[in-house]
Amino acid sequence: IPEAEIIGFASGNPIPNKAFAMAVPEIHIVMKASSAVLLSRLGSRYKRDGVVSYQPDDKELQKGAVRQCTDLLVTAGFKFRRCAFGSDDPKVCLLVPPSLGFCTESVAIEFFVNSDMPLHTETIISECKIQDARAESLILLVRRWA
């Protein structure tokens, strides 16, 4: 989607402890696009004879966009791990294999569409680190065990 903005957040080093990094990915990718753009680019399921026959709400568009982007990413070589479409912020967890050339080891990421949750999480971690440098490690530990 050329009109989309892609934002990435990393809240730790996902490589050293693979088991934890796979269970709770520390890399979050967010695609931001307006509902109109999502509907025009990914809304073929809502059209009949080229005309929108059903107007989905923003949550339905968000989930549909996550699903369709996941299909595209898996086709490109990413590995599907799990999804969370029932949550307030639908997301999918994907594995980036070394064969794609981004890293030497597999890395887990979470992919969102139009979600502010990763930004809020990163903001909280950053603000807590200002108060106490140990806060980031504690927050990441709690996230892994939650």
Image: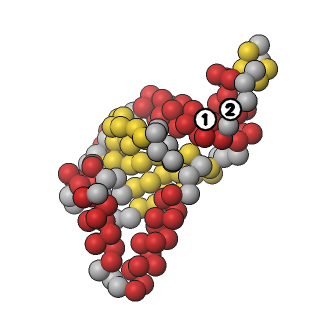
The three-letter code of the residue at mark 2 reads Pro
For the residue pair 35 and 100, the one nearer the viewer reads as 35
Left or right for 100, reference 21: right
Residue at 34% in and 73% down: 136
Q: Which residue is mark 1?
A: 60
**Circle 1 SS class:** helix
The three-letter code of the residue at mark 1 reads Glu
Q: Which residue is mark 2?
A: 56
Left or right for 19, reference 93: left
Q: Quadrant of the C terminus?
A: bottom left
- Is residue 52 something that shows in the picture? yes
CB atoms of marks 1 and 2 within 8 Å: yes
- Is residue 2 something that shows in the picture? no
User: Local crowd at mark 2 within 10 Å, few (<14), some, or many (≥20)?
Assistant: some
For the residue pair 79 and 77, the one nearer the viewer reads as 79
Q: Residue furthest right?
A: 51
Residue at 27% in and 49% down: 23
Which colour scheme appears in the figure?
A: secondary structure
Residue at 38% in and 43% down: 93
Left or right for 116, reference 126: right
**Circle 2 SS class:** loop
Residue at 35% in and 85% down: 132
